[in-house]
């Protein structure tokens, strides 16, 4: 029985800095000198010698984060071994940045390499047209790994061949450098006399990717519906 369990659920050889264990656990191959920032409380197990300490940004960065509604409670992970991360059963997506960047909702960040540059950016193309929360995102750039979470198995879309439109409540992350604009379209409410009769989408085009989750975010992070 133990051998069957280990064969089905046991540790697998890592294939990179970050690798999946199923679709809800991120395994990180930790090395000395290559620290990791992870969401506080996300560690579920580890092998080897790994230490954890609360990470506090400088006061200016904390104030900007609070003003933008993009505060991250992170811990700094250091040491040698295998680190396993999860976030209450959410699906986990891992990607390697190679000099490029990703814009992601702060609540969807699970972990990222410490050498990446983190900043808070306005969402280009829609920030100047609408008010409310959600006009800012966390941007990670440089060379390193990132793990993000989604509510359910995500779809990763390629907007390079044709414009890709996304419900903002299902939007998780996208490549920096994509062209972004807002679009309005008639919605079913118009047919039965409810609401304004319009719905808002975010349209992407260019070389890169867009990550969309199957469950809409009920926190109204992007308050741009008509």
Image: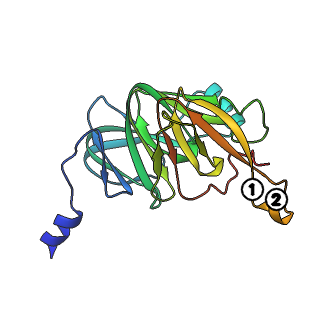
**Residue 104 rendering spot, x and y as whole percentages:** 54, 39
Name which residue lies at 62% across and 55% down. 217
Up the image or down, 186 lies above or below 59; here it is below
* Residue identified by numbered label 2: 190
Quadrant (top left, top right, bottom left, bottom right) of the N terminus:
bottom left
Q: Count numbered badges in the picture.
A: 2
Name which residue lies at 42% across and 51% down. 92
Q: Is residue 215 visible?
A: yes
Tell me, yes or no, whether the two marked residues, 2 and 1, touch with CB atoms within 8 Å.
Answer: yes
Instruction: Determine whether the residue tagged by mark 2 lies in a helix, strand or loop.
Output: helix
Name which residue lies at 47% across and 39% down. 158
Q: Is residue 226 left or right of residue 102?
A: right
Task: Name the residue furthest bottom.
Answer: 1
Q: Is residue 55 left or right of residue 223?
A: left
Q: Is residue 135 visible?
A: no
Instruction: Determine whether the residue tagged by mark 1 lies in a helix, strand or loop.
Output: loop
Up the image or down, 66 lies above or below 9; here it is above
**Residue 29 rendering spot, x and y as whole percentages:** 27, 41
In this view, the residue in front, 74 or 193, is 193
Which color mode does the image show? Answer: rainbow
Residue 187 shows which numbered tag?
A: 1
Measured in 3D between alpha carbons, the distance from the residue under mark 2 to the one under mark 1, in whole angstroms, is 6 Å
In this view, the residue in front, 22 or 37, is 22
Q: Quadrant of residue 98?
A: top left
**Residue 203 rendering spot, x and y as whole percentages:** 62, 38
Residue 214 shows which numbered tag?
A: none
Q: Are there few (<14), some (14-19), or many (20+) residues within 10 Å of tag 2?
A: few
Q: Are there few (<14), some (14-19), or many (20+) residues within 10 Å of tag 1?
A: some
Q: Quadrant of residue 202?
A: top right
**Residue 112 rendering spot, x and y as whole percentages:** 42, 37
């Amino acid at each position: 029985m133990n051998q069957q369990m280990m064969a089905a659920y046991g540790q697998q050889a890592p294939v990179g800095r970050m690798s999946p264990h199923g679709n809800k656990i991120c395994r990180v191959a930790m090395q000395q000198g290559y620290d990791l920032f992870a969401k506080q409380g996300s560690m579920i197990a580890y092998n080897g010698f790994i230490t954890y300490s609360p990470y506090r940004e400088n006061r200016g960065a904390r104030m900007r984060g609070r003003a933008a509604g993009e505060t991250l409670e992170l811990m700094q992970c250091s040491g040698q071994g295998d680190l396993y991360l999860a976030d209450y059963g959410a699906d986990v997506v891992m990607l390697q940045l190679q000099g490029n960047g990703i814009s992601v909702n702060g609540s969807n960040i699970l972990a990222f390499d410490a050498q990446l540059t983190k900043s808070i950016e306005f969402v280009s193309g829609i920030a100047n047209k609408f008010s409310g929360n959600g006009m800012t995102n966390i941007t990670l750039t440089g060379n390193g790994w990132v793990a993000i979470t989604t509510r359910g198995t995500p779809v990763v879309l390629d907007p390079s061949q044709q414009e890709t439109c996304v419900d903002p409540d299902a939007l998780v992350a996208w490549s920096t450098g994509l062209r972004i604009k807002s679009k309005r379209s008639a919605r079913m409410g118009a047919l039965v006399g409810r609401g304004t009769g319009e719905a808002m989408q975010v349209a992407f085009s260019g070389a890169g990717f867009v990550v969309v989750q199957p469950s809409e975010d009920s926190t109204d992070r992007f308050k741009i519906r008509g």
